[in-house]
Amino acid sequence: VRKTWAISGVALHLDLDGKPVRARLESVLREAVSSGLLPPGTALPASRPLAEDLGVARNTVAAAYAQLVAEGWLMARQGSGTVVADSVRAVQPAARSAEPARGPRYDLRPGSPDTSAFPRAGWLAAARRALNTAPAEALGDKGDPRGRPELRQALAVLLARTRGVRANPERILICSGFTQGLDLLCRTLRRRGATGLAIEQFGLQDYHRIAEDAGLRTSPLNVDSFGASTRELDNTDAAAVLLTPAHQFPLGAPLAPARRNQAVAWAAQRDAFVIEDDYDGEFRYDRQPVGAMQALAPDHVIYAGTASKSLAPGLRLGWLVLPPALVEDVVATKALADRQTSTFEQLTLAEFIVSGRYDRHVRRARLAYRQRRDQLVATVTRHDPSLRITGIAAGLHAMLELPAGADEDAVVAEAADHDLALLGLRRFSVAPGAHPPALVVGYGTPPEHAYTAAVARLIATLPAV
Ligand SMILES: Cc1ncc(COP(=O)(O)O)c(C=O)c1O
């Protein structure tokens, strides 16, 4: 059994088979400290939560810490637990320039799932099997730009079952995350004569830039508690609209049924397209999943999914389910961009899905994130029942509205001073306009053992009402 946990964003692995756990824990920590992975001053998790995460006795962790304190690697600091000893500096190798700078100790920015909970053992087993059984042609240069048939087949079944997508493997294209998917779509639409893309007024600024870089002018749609204001589509010259129907990013509402119909009717009438960014569709907590909009009009809705929330953004795996009219052109754009996405990663994901590991992982992750969400809501409400926290029915982030008149940037800066990374709503506004001060809290990001402390820091930096 291999357990993975993280300290200050550094993932550490512990094999629980064989040798005594305490000795293994000591050697993993000794190695991490002596190699400079955990620099002097880095705080170690308290023994109780770490023991819980690893499924070992608390005494085992405490004894390992005590041994490393005795050896001089760690020190017990009054009031702040166990940290990497200052004296380790002397034996550290010269700073390696390629090493990324240490990030903030606590991170509640949206965007990433808990990468310390990545199912490494399952992924490795899937990779091994995929590599053992891959045909030689999977290594060649004549691959289909749409991607490996094994993965397109596995996704067609998975998406139909879990998201209600009407998917045919022939119309699925594997890309390097949604980021590349959007880029391919924008370039293709531009080449077909499109001049504009409608986008939601709140969203990722990068997506707005991708569209403009491909030569499309963007027209922002207002967003309210029913999602994007699709009525405004009629006032644009857009050939497509980019929406986050399951869980508006970042405000959090699902797109209301009437608006879904409106967008689809607009697309049918104009011969336009809806790009459905289903980035966190697997994570819905309180009600039945909101199905994909694509099923309403497969000829006009481009369904886009990604492994970035359900598995890890570093995989760079995403998929488009294309309307028949677009397949040929998007495939041509993909071939020009990079021929095809890495076949090994595709074959591994296919195996991971077909073997049932993907379902099991998502089920486990959903439960864990739901508990984090409940903890966040309970802690905020206990602190100040007048604070509103919204967009919480799904996903890995929530909107925390700050008291009227609060300065969003000041709260973010104050948090940074306390080693907590936060992002305000302003960062996600793609068009000028006033909005109430709010934080977009990514509760999926921290490793499990750091979550409670991260939420406590968040509360400590909230302005007094
Ligand atoms: C709104 C939204 N869409 C899509 C993605 C996924 O992008 P990618 O698949 O390129 O990692 C994210 C990830 O941060 C996101 O926030």
Image (tube, helix red, strand yellow):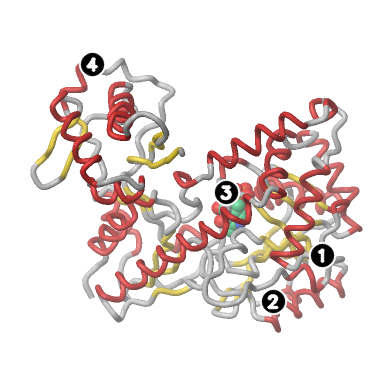
Looking at the picture, tell me which residue is in the foreground, 336 or 295: 295
Mark linked to residue 166 = 1
Where does residue 106 sit, x and y in percent of width and height? 33, 49
First in residue order: circle 3 vs circle 1: 1
Mark linked to residue 230 = 2
The kind of residue on which mark 2 rests is Thr
Mark 1 vs 4: CB contact within 8 A: no
The kind of residue on which mark 3 rests is Leu
Looking at the picture, tell me which residue is in the foreground, 147 or 410: 147
Q: Could you give the CA–CA distance between mark 1 and mark 2, rounded to whole angstroms?
A: 23 Å
> Which residue lies under the disc numbered 3?
311
Where does residue 176 sit, x and y in percent of width and height? 68, 42
Q: Nearer the viewer, mark 2 or mark 3?
A: 3
Residue lying at the far bottom in this picture: please name it: 258
Label 3 C-beta lies within 8 Å of the nearest ligand 1 atom: no
Mark 2 vs 3: CB contact within 8 A: no
Does the rendering let one see residue 451? yes
Kind of element beneath mark 1: loop
Label 3 packing within 10 angstroms: few (<14), some (14-19), many (20+): many
> Which residue lies under the disc numbered 4?
91
Does the rendering let one see residue 208? no
Q: Could you give the CA–CA distance between mark 4 and mark 2, rounded to whole angstroms?
A: 61 Å
Looking at the picture, tell me which residue is in the foreground, 273 or 105: 105
Q: Could you give the CA–CA distance between mark 3 and mark 1, rounded to whole angstroms?
A: 23 Å
Q: Could you give the CA–CA distance between mark 3 and mark 4, rounded to whole angstroms?
A: 37 Å
Q: Does residue 6 lie above or below 201 as drawn?
A: above
Q: Does residue 331 lie above or below 302 as drawn?
A: above
The kind of residue on which mark 4 rests is Val
Label 2 packing within 10 angstroms: few (<14), some (14-19), many (20+): many
First in residue order: circle 3 vs circle 4: 4
